[in-house]
Amino acid sequence: MTESNIEGESESKVLFLDGETPRALKGIIVSEDKEFIVLRRRDGVVRIAKRFVIKIETKKRSDADGNSRT
């Protein structure tokens, strides 16, 4: 997913720990609560526990530099 959809949703990159290995997934955050982030990707929906999240980067289509939130 390299583009935002028509509704203007932004693509996010979530960096998290998978065991001791850092991993990153790209997609659109569709929901978030105090324990999980739900990420919609081309290959399906992924739930990531917030306790393993290191960083979330959100990049809007018109934002060349990207915004970062932790």
Image (cartoon, helix red, strand yellow):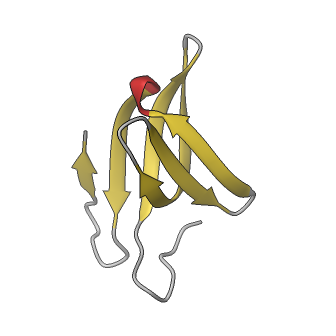
Q: At 25% across and 61% down in the image, what residue appears?
A: 65
- Looking at the image, residue 39 lies above or below residue 16: below
Q: Residue furthest bottom?
A: 6
Q: At 54% across and 68% down in the image, what residue appears?
A: 2
Quarter occupied by the C terminus: top left
- Looking at the image, residue 26 lies above or below residue 35: below
In this view of the protein, which residue sits in the foreground, 7 or 15?
Answer: 7
- Looking at the image, residue 52 lies above or below residue 40: above
In this view of the protein, which residue sits in the foreground, 19 or 66?
Answer: 19
Q: Return the x and y of residue 17 as percentages of the image width and height.
A: 51, 22
Q: Return the x and y of residue 62 as percentages of the image width and height.
A: 30, 79
Q: At 66% across and 54% down in the image, what residue appears?
A: 45
Q: Return the x and y of residue 35 as percentages of the image width and height.
A: 42, 35
Q: Return the x and y of residue 53 as percentages of the image width and height.
A: 41, 30
Q: Is residue 47 left or right of residue 53?
A: right
The image quarter containing residue 43 is bottom right
In this view of the protein, which residue sits in the foreground, 37 or 14?
Answer: 37
